[in-house]
Amino acid sequence: MKHAGSPSSGMPLRLAFIGPWNYSNGLGVGARGHISALWHTAHGINLHPIHQPFHVHARLPVSSDVASFEGPADIAIVSINPDGWDRLLTEAQWQVVRGARARVGAFVWEMDTAPLEWKGLMDTLDAIWTPSSFCAAAIARRTARPVHVVPHVVPVTPPPLVRPADLGVPAGRHTILYAFDGASFLSRKRPMALVEAFGASGLGARGWQLVLKTKNLEHAAEAGAALIAATDADPAITLLTMPLREDQMSALVERAAIYASPHCSEGFGLTIAEAMARGKIVVATDYGGSRDFLDASCGFPVAWKQVSLARNDGPYPKGGVWAEVDLPALTTALLDAAALAEAGDASLGGQARRRIAQDLSPVAVAGRIDASLAQIAAGVGLA
C-alpha cells in the first residue's frame, strides 16, 4: 500500500525547506530558485529563512517563515553547506530537521573534493542535493550517501526596463562584462586574468570596454587593491563597486555583448547561466559546474591547466585542486567572441538562451526534484 505522502502515489509530501532565500548573494539566488521549482510540484512546502547574520551579505526585507501545513515534515531540506548548520540554524529549525522522516542537505563546493570536515554530517543524511555534476563528483568522494544533481533555476525573462545608461557605464562602446563578489575570493574568481587577456587582445583600441561589476571588494585585501590599480591604469576598463538592485544588474547584463568568466572554479556558475539566458555570447573557463550547460555549441569554453593551492585561502585548503585559465586561449576567445558581436551574429547567444530555457527552467528543475524525492521517499519507507 502506498504511503499518502509518496510522490509515486500522486499525493503530496510535506517538505520543510530551510535556506538563505532571504539573503542577497549567490546562495540566496540558488535557494530562491529551488523554491520556485518546488512551487511547480504538488508538495506541501514550509519555508524557513536564515535568521542569523550570514557573513557580509545583506538580508532582504522579507524574512518570515511561511507554512502550508502543520506538524512534522516528511522531508527536511537544508540549503546550507555543512559548516554552517550549527552556526546558522536556530533551535526551532533543528527541531524541524530532527522531526522529519528524511533529511536532505543542499550543498555546493568549488574544488575537486569536498572538505573532510563535511563527512560526519553528510553521512547522517538520507540524500544530498547539489547543483552540478562537478559538485556531485566532489561530494561523492567524501560520502557514500546518495547524491542527486538538482541544478539551480535560471529563468529566461524579458529584457529589463531600467536603462543601462543610468548605471554609470560609458555609452557607445561594445561591452564585455564580468560580475563577481569580492567576498567569494578573488583567487577563485580571477578577474585579473580577464584584465590581462583584455589588454593583450587590443580590443580597447577597437572601441570595446571591459566592465567589472563587484561588491565587498574591501574584503579582498591586497588582491582587491591590485585589481583597483590595474583597472585604474586602463581607460577602457570600468570597475563598478556600488550596490545594484536586481533590475539594475539585469540591465547591466543586457547592455553587454559578451559575458566573460575566467574563474578557477564554480560550483555551478550562476552568472554564466544568467548571461546565457539573456542570449549573450559567453566566454568562460571550461571547468567546474558551468560545464553542465556551456560548451562549444553555445559559447566559448576556454582551456585551462590544473593547479594546486600553495597555501590555505579561506575555506580552500592548501593542496586543493582547481583550474587556472590559459591566458592566450582566453585572449583568443575574447577576440573570436568580439568578431561575432561586431558582425551582428546572434546565433551562438540564441543557442545559449535555448539551452538554459530547456535545462534550467523552474519546470525542468521541478522534474529533477520530483525524481529525487521519489527515491528518497522510497529509501525511508514513505513509498
Image: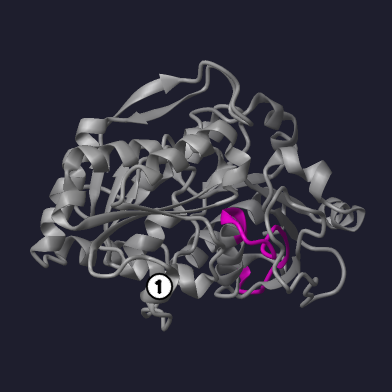
In the picture as drawn, the residue positioned furthest to the left comes out as 343
* Viewer-nearest residue: 45 or 28: 28
- On screen, residue 377 versus residue 180, left or right, reads right
In the displayed structure image, the side of residue 256 where residue 82 appears, left or right:
right
Q: How crowded is mark 1: few (under 14 residues within 10 Å), some or many (20 or more)?
A: many
The quadrant of the image that shows the C terminus is bottom right
Protein image colouring:
one colour
Q: Locate residue 174, reporting x and y percent.
A: 22, 62
Q: Can residue 2 be seen in this view?
A: no
Q: Can I make out residue 141 in this image?
A: yes
State left or right for residue 209 relative to residue 230: left
Rendered position, 382 above or below 226? below
Is 23 in the magenta?
Answer: yes
Residue that numbered label 1 is attached to = 251
Indicate the position of residue 199 as horizontal and vertical percent values: 24, 40
Residue 73 covered by magenta stretch: no
Q: Position of residue 278 (x, y in %)?
A: 33, 68
Q: Which of 364 and 31 is in front in this view?
A: 31
The picture quadrant where one finds residue 350 is: bottom left
* Up-down relation of residue 233 to residue 253 (above or below): above
Q: What stretch is highlighted in magenta?
A: 9-28
* Residue shown at 61% from the left, 75% from the top: 42
Measured along the vertical axis of the image, is residue 288 above or below residue 207?
Answer: above
Position of the N terminus, as image quadrant, is bottom right
Q: Is mark 1 on a helix, strand or loop?
A: helix
- Total marks shown come to 1
Residue visible at 38% across and 44% down? 231
Under mark 1, the amino acid is Ala
The structure residue drawn at horizontal position 49% and vertical position 75%, both measured from the top left corner, is: 247
Q: Where is residue 230 in the image (x, y as percent from the top left)?
A: 39, 39
